[in-house]
Image (cartoon, grey):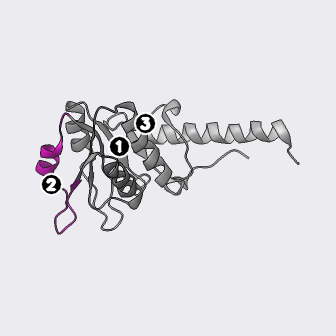
Amino acid sequence: TRLVGSEMCIRDRTYLDTARSQIAAALGCSASEVYFTSCGSESDNTAIWSALQTQPEKRHLITTRVEHPAVLNVVQYWERQGYHVTLLGVDGKGRLDLDEYAAALSDDTALVSIMFANNEVGDIYPIQAMAEMAKERGILFHTDAVQAVGKTPIDLRHLPVDMLSLSAVSYTHLTLPT
């Protein structure tokens, strides 16, 4: 059967709504909290830009030296715009120092953006603890979970992140209606 015009739009909307509901169920969030972008990099950029636009009075960002370029490039852009950027280091095994992280948090911090899992060495970062520390200070927290979703349990009902980025490649097990 050949679909044209509004029939195709209705079918496509059904696919999007189904995918949104499946992703929400898998992550433990509401379907209204799921937004689609073209890729993980665009999702990271959208999260970071949105967080900064909602609180222009705050001029500090925290991320790691080992983030994906999608995060590092946009953070470097904001640094050129006058933002103070803290790049957290990792030890020889790729682990973050939570004391260094805690010391970096300030009243001027607008956003923390830390990958959930390091795509180079496979480390899972302590996102639960880091997000809780940010929440205690009223700081927004974003995690790039492209490398983690579908491989490690993520339940947003219990994970205090404000924004989580993922990619369709993380959800190859989802099926859409025909």
Residue 13 image position (x, y, % from top left): 69, 37
Q: Which residue lies under the disc numbered 2?
A: 97
Q: Secondary structure at mark 1?
A: strand
Q: CA distance from mark 1 to mark 3?
A: 16 Å
User: Badge 1 is on which residue?
Assistant: 142
Residue 9 quadrant: top right
Q: Which image quadrant for residue 111?
A: top left
Nearer-N-terminus badge (2/3): 3
Q: Which residue is mark 3?
A: 28
- The residue carrying pointer 1 sits among few (fewer than 14), some (14 to 19) or many (20 or more) residues within 10 Å by Cα, namely many
Looking at the image, how many numbered discs can be counted on the residues?
A: 3
Is residue 105 toward the left or the right of residue 144 in the image? left
Percent x, y for residue 42? 50, 50
The CA span between labels 2 and 1 is 18 Å
The amino acid type of the residue labelled 2 equals Asp
Coordinates of residue 81 in the picture (x, y in percent): 34, 47
- Residue 113 colored in magenta in the image: no
Which of the 4 image quadrants contains residue 156? top left
Is residue 1 rendered to the left or right of residue 127? right
The front one of 149 and 99 is: 99
The disc labelled 3 sits on which kind of residue?
Gly
Residue at left offset 39%, top offset 40%: 163
Mark 2 lies on a secondary structure that is: loop
